Amino acid sequence: MTITTDITIIGGGVIGLLTAREFLTTGATVTIIEKNALGQESSWAGGGILLPLYPWRQADAITRLALQSLKLYPDLASELITDTGVDPEWTPCGLLITKNPDITAATDWCSSNAISFQQAGAEFFNCLDTQAENPLWLPEIAQARNPRLVKSLKQDLIIKGAIVHEHTELTAVNVHNKRVTSINITSGQTTINQLDVNQLVISAGAWTGQLFKQFFSEFACDAPKIAPVKGQMLLYDARPDTLSTMVLDGDQYLIPRRDGKILAGSTVEHDEFNKTVTTAALDRLNTFAVNLMPALKNYPLIKHWAGLRPGTEDGVPYIDKHPEVGNLSINAGHFRNGLVMGPASAQLMVDLILNRPTAVNPEPYKLCRKA
Ligand SMILES: Cc1cc2nc3c(=O)[nH]c(=O)nc-3n(C[C@H](O)[C@H](O)[C@H](O)COP(=O)(O)OP(=O)(O)OC[C@H]3O[C@@H](n4cnc5c(N)ncnc54)[C@H](O)[C@@H]3O)c2cc1C
C-alpha cells in the first residue's frame, strides 16, 4: 500500500532536505523523491561558505535569507549532531577577504547587518602571497562541510519518519481543477508508479526550470528562470592547521576543513547539464591555489569535481506557492548560496504553505516576478 503523506518534495538536495526537516518538525508527514541518491548533486559539490561572496554587491533579498540562516545554523548543527551522531562540521573559522576595492560598502554592510569585522593585519598573511587591498577579517563567519551536512540531514529525516524514494524520478504530474492530484515516478528502467499528492514542493535545483516547463506550461506564470551553472573544485590533502581560516581572494577562495583538507574553488561556467571536469579549470584553480598559498605545493591534489548550481540571473531563489495551482510550491534557484540561504528558505517555504507569519518578507522570492 502506498501512503499519501501531507507533503511530497521533489529533489533531495540541501533545499529539499531542509524543507522536509522543517515540515517534519511541525508534525507533517513527508515523502522525498530523488532521482539519484540524496544530496549528491550541487549540495555535495559546493564549498559550504556560510556567507554570500561579497554580499554588499548582491541583492538585498540574498542578504535577508542569509542573515536569517546564520541565526539558525548553530542550533541546526547541534541538533543534527545530537539526533544523528553525524557532525555537519559547522565551524566558525572566520573569513579573510584579501581585496576590497569597495571597502566602505563592505564595512557599511557589515555594520548595518551586525556582522563583526576588522581590518586584517600582516599576521593574517604569514602563509599567503597576494596583493592585498583593504583586507577585511570577518571572524564569526562559518562553514559547513557539504557531504557531512547532507549525510546528517538524510539520517535525521529517516529517524524522523520521512518516506524517502532514492533513484526515483518525477516523470509526470497529473493536474485536475488547478490541483496536483498525483505524480508519476519512475525507478529503474521500467517501473512507473502513481503517487497521490496533498501538497507538492519542487526543489529540484538546476532541473527545476525544466520541470516547470514540462509540467506547468499552460498556467499563466512563466517557468522559473533557473539554469545550470557549473562550478569546479579541487581538494588538497593538507595537514590539520595548515590554514586556519577561509580566504576569499578576488573571485576564488580556499576553504580549510577540520581534518586539514583544503578546497580551492571555483569556476562559474554556463555549460548546460554538463558536469565534466576540464584540465583548463584544473590548471587555473591549481595555479590560483599554489600562488596564494605556496605551502600547498607540498600536499597532494587528491580530488577534482564539478557540480551544477541552480542559477538565477540575480541569485535570488524562487520560494512561493504557485498562484494558480493550489497545492504546488517551489523552493529552488539558490545559485551560489544554497547552503547559506537554505535553512531560512526552508522556514519561509513551510511558513507560506502553513499560512503562518514569515520571518523574512516573501515578496522578492515570488514565482511570477519579472526576470
Ligand atoms: C562548486 C560549487 C561551490 C559552491 N559553494 C557554495 C558555498 O560556498 N556556499 C553556499 O551557500 N552555496 C554554495 N554553492 C551552491 C549550493 O551548493 C547550491 O545552491 C545548493 O546546493 C542548491 O541546492 P538544491 O537542493 O537546490 O540543488 P541540488 O543539490 O542540485 O539538488 C537538487 C536535487 O533534485 C534532484 N532532481 C532533479 N530532477 C529530479 C526529478 N525529475 N525527480 C527527482 N529528483 C530530481 C537532483 O538529482 C538533485 O539531487 C556551491 C555550488 C557549487 C557547485
Image (tube, rainbow, N blue to C red):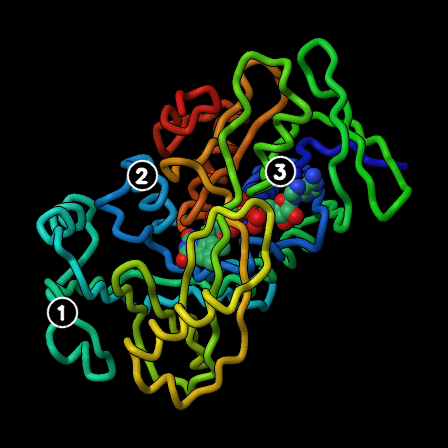
The quadrant the C terminus occupies is: top left
The reply to whether callout 3 and callout 1 are in contact (CB within 8 Å) is no
Q: Residues within 10 Å of mark 3 (few under 14, many from 20)?
A: few
Q: Pick whichever, 307 or 239, lies toward us.
A: 307
Q: Residues within 10 Å of mark 1 (few under 14, many from 20)?
A: some
Residue 159 image point, x, y percent? 68, 55
Mark 3 and ligand 1: say if the CB distance to the nearest ligand atom is below 8 Å.
Answer: no
The secondary element bearing badge 3 is classed as loop
Q: Is residue 183 left or right of residue 263?
A: right
Q: Is residue 131 left or right of residue 340?
A: left
Q: Residues within 10 Å of mark 2 (few under 14, many from 20)?
A: some
The secondary element bearing badge 1 is classed as loop
Q: In this view of the protein, can residue 75 be seen by the observer?
A: no
Write down the residue under mark 3: 27
Residue at 38 percent across and 87 percent down: it is 297
Write down the residue under mark 2: 64
Residue at 66 percent across and 50 percent down: it is 160
The reply to whether callout 3 and callout 2 are in contact (CB within 8 Å) is no
Q: In this view of the protein, can residue 116 be seen by the observer?
A: yes
Residue at 31 percent across and 39 percent down: it is 64
Residue 319 image point, x, y percent? 48, 31
Residue at 65 percent across and 51 percent down: it is 157
Q: CA distance from mark 3 to mark 2?
A: 27 Å
Residue that lies at the very extreme toward the bottom in this rendered image: 298
What's the amino acid at mark 2?
Answer: Arg
Mark 2 and ligand 1: say if the CB distance to the nearest ligand atom is below 8 Å.
Answer: no
- Count all numbered tags in the image, as a single digit: 3
The circle drawn on residue 120 is 1
